[in-house]
Image (cartoon, rainbow, N blue to C red):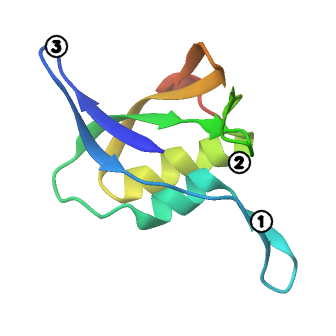
């Protein structure tokens, strides 16, 4: 996941976090999705910053880009957890295929 702060003139990467899906976590064999893992690593900020999030998924053979659209639970976590760390999400961009990216506006994210 990449958080990007943007303005009309420039775009800069605020935070580059990698997250990995983790399976069989805890006694109930729960999973942690990559989005949640990356947000856990995100540092707190005192000044509220508006950011865009990029989520992408790569095939096991690392040759293809796959659909990386966050699930409903991850969308809720992105809004809640990033906000608690001092960031406001503008859009969540995600990969669809090797040559296509789409996005979800803040207002369209699951609450």
Residue sitting nearer the eye, 59 or 105 = 59
Residue on which the image places disc 1: 31
Q: Residue at x 69, y 29 (%)?
A: 64
Name of the residue lying farthest toward the bottom: 27
Q: Residue furthest right?
A: 28
Residue position for label 2: 73
Q: Residue at x 58, y 51 (%)?
A: 35
Residue at 50% in and 44% down: 79
The answer to whether 29 appears left or right of 9 in the picture is: right
* Local crowd size for mark 3, using a 10 Å CA cut-off: few (<14), some (14–19), many (≥20): few
Where on the picture, by quarter, is residue 98? top right
Give the image location of residue 62, x and y in percent.
Answer: 66, 40
15 w.r.t. 94: above or below: below
Q: Which residue is mark 3?
A: 8
Task: Classify 40 as above or below 69.
Answer: below
| Mark nearer the N terminus (1 vs 2) | 1
Q: Nearer the viewer, residue 75 or 97?
A: 97
> Which of the pair 60/66 is nearer the observer?
60
The answer to whether residue 93 is left or right of residue 76 is left
Q: Nearer the viewer, residue 58 or 31?
A: 58
Q: CA distance from mark 3 to mark 1?
A: 39 Å
Q: Name the image quarter holding residue 88.
A: top left
Q: In x, y percent, where is residue 23?
A: 79, 68
User: Does residue 19 show up?
Assistant: yes
Mark whose residue sits in front, 1 or 2: 1
Q: Nearer the viewer, mark 3 or mark 2?
A: 3
- Badge 3 element: loop
């Amino acid at each position: 996941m990449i958080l990007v702060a943007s303005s009309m003139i420039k775009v800069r990467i605020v935070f580059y976090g990698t997250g990995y899906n983790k399976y069989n976590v805890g006694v109930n064999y729960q999973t942690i999705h990559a989005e949640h893992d990356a947000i856990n690593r995100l540092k707190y900020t005192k000044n509220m910053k508006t950011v865009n999030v990029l989520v992408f998924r790569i095939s096991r053979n690392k040759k293809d880009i796959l659909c990386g659209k966050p699930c409903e639970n991850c969308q809720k976590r992105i809004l809640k957890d990033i906000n608690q760390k001092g960031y406001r999400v503008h859009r969540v961009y995600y990969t669809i295929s090797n040559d296509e990216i789409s996005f979800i506006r803040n207002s369209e994210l699951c609450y």
